[in-house]
Image (tube, rainbow, N blue to C red):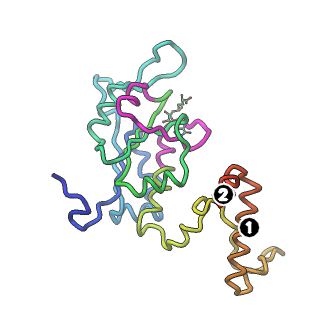
């Protein structure tokens, strides 16, 4: 039986398996900057698996026309299911990025980061045959009310959001704790040098050296921005407070 991190005392890397028709898209931007460094250091692992490798005919067919007619092609359940069976292990969450899914938010990102990893099944064309989704009880997760041409950009977004929360990936824990959504509010504005730029100054309180007043100003700004821009978040925040 495989040893877990808890048994050996050594933490296992967080693992992502991406099933895709375009494995060349990975790691893509996740190979750079903080995520790329963490990948190179083994904080997390990424396996991009070509679904076409599970096709059953010599033409390596992965899709077919929809029953009932209509435009576009549908990814075959047998091929997708074989790819899942060969690469997914049940301790990981099995997610189908899909515009019909629960919308990704910071709470779900935190949940995913706290677990051992994810398997992401990227759709193309009109998406996956419903039977493959049902047979594997895939969780559908959307990155917003837009239609992408494939699940890969959505998978990159999800992985980027999760990886930056893994221990040791982002410099200071406090910088994560204060960010948009973590407090239920959008974040306050930031300023840096020069103190006067193009005739614009920075708010006086930020150069006052008074930590209490700075904290209060930031809180007020975060509240005002949230109230004006995201009444939905504001309502939830007020209810919680
Ligand atoms: C062209 S889309 C299919 C759209 C689908 N026919 C519909 O109308 O809902 C192809 C694939 O892109 C991915 N995708 C598209 N929009 C997405 C979104 N907002 N969030 C996550 N994945 C998305 C899904 O994996 C989907 O199977």
The residue most toward the left is 1
Inspect the magenta stretch and tell me whether residue 153 lies in it.
yes
Q: Is mark 1 within 8 Å of ligand 1?
A: no
Residue 207 vs residue 111, the one in the foreground: 111
Q: 92 above or below 168?
A: above
Q: x and y percent of residue 26 in the render?
A: 41, 49
Query: What is the residue that sits farthest to the right in this orientation?
Result: 199
| Residue 241: percent from left, percent from top | 65, 61
| Mark 2 residue element | helix
Is 39 positioned to the left or the right of 106 in the image? left
Q: Secondary structure at mark 1?
A: helix
Look at the image and give the residue range highlighted in magenta: 128-156
Mark whose residue sits in front, 2 or 1? 2
Crowdedness of circle 1 by 10 Å Cα count: few (<14), some, many (20+)?
some
What residue is pinned by disc 2?
Answer: 237
Q: Residue at x 68, y 76 (%)?
A: 215
């Amino acid at each position: 039986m495989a040893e877990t991190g808890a048994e050996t005392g050594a933490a296992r890397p967080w693992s992502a398996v991406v099933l895709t028709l375009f494995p060349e898209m990975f790691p893509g931007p996740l190979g750079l900057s903080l995520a790329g460094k963490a990948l190179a250091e083994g904080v997390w692992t990424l396996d991009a698996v070509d679904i076409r490798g599970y096709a059953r005919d010599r033409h390596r067919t992965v899709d077919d026309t929809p029953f009932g007619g209509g435009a576009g092609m549908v990814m075959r359940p047998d091929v997708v299911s074989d790819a899942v069976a060969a690469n997914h292990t049940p301790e990981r969450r099995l997610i189908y990025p899909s515009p019909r899914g629960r919308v990704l938010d910071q709470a779900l990102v935190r949940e995913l980061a706290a677990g051992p990893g994810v398997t992401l099944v990227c759709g193309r064309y009109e998406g996956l045959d419903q039977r493959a989704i049902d047979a594997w009880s895939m969780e559908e997760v959307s990155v917003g009310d837009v239609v992408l041409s494939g699940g890969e950009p959505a998978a990159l977004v999800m992985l980027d959001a999760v990886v930056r929360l893994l221990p040791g990936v982002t410099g200071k824990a406090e910088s994560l704790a204060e960010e948009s959504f973590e407090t239920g509010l959008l974040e306050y504005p930031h300023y840096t040098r020069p103190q006067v730029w193009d005739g614009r100054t920075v708010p006086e309180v930020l150069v006052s050296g008074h930590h209490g007043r700075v904290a209060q100003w930031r809180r007020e700004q975060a509240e005002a921005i949230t109230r004006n821009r995201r009444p939905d978040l504001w309502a939830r925040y007020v209810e919680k407070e």
